[in-house]
Image (tube, rainbow, N blue to C red):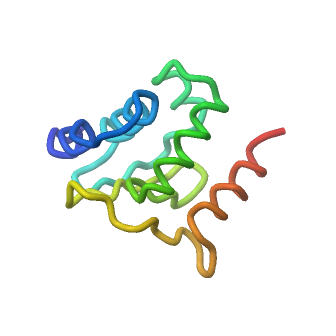
Amino acid sequence: MNTAVMSWAWKQRLPRADKRLLFVLAVGADATGLIRHLTISQLVAKTGMSSRNVHQCLSRLIAAGLIQWLDSDCYRLNIGSDSPSPAPVAAKGASARQTMVVYLRKRLP
């Protein structure tokens, strides 16, 4: 738990659900903003949101450039500035939105 990362997350101007999820991710992040081994079911349990809502919030946070999806249970917070950078490319040749759509298709029945 890193207070600087949590403070960064708290300062972001977001809808309530998105901010809640970002803060939960920040609590699990190291000093560089890396979050490892935090599954969707764990995010559901920690936020009190439905799985679908967690997926939607993750998509919005990725599109806003606040987080980067690295793997099925690994994320990186794009800390370092109060204004988010453009949405990062999570896979070669794919936008973050396309990658999240692929991820959602793999995870949902």
Q: Residue at x 74, y 44 (%)?
A: 107
**Where 4 falls versus 81 (above or below)?**
above
Number of callouts: 0
Horizontal side, residue 3 vs residue 65: left or right: left
Q: Nearer the viewer, residue 37 or 104?
A: 104
Q: Which quadrant would residue 34 be assigned to in this image?
A: bottom left
Residue 61: x and y, percent?
A: 46, 48
- Please, which residue is most extreme toward the top here? 48
Q: Nearer the viewer, residue 21 or 75?
A: 21
Q: Which quadrant would residue 98 be assigned to in this image?
A: bottom right
Q: Nearer the viewer, residue 15 or 78?
A: 15
Q: Where, quadrant-wise, is the C terminus in this rendering?
A: top right
Q: Residue at x 32, y 45 (%)?
A: 29
Q: Which quadrant would residue 44 be assigned to in this image?
A: top right
Q: Where, quadrant-wise, is the N terminus in this rendering?
A: top left
**Where 93 falls versus 18 (above or below)?**
below
- Please, which residue is most extreme toward the right here? 109
Q: Residue at x 38, y 54 (%)?
A: 66
Horizontal side, residue 80 vs residue 46: left or right: left
Horizontal side, residue 46 vs residue 79: left or right: right
- Please, which residue is most extreme toward the left here? 4
Residue 13: x and y, percent?
A: 30, 40
Residue 39: x and y, percent?
A: 56, 39
Residue 73: x and y, percent?
A: 55, 48
Q: Residue at x 67, y 32 (%)?
A: 52
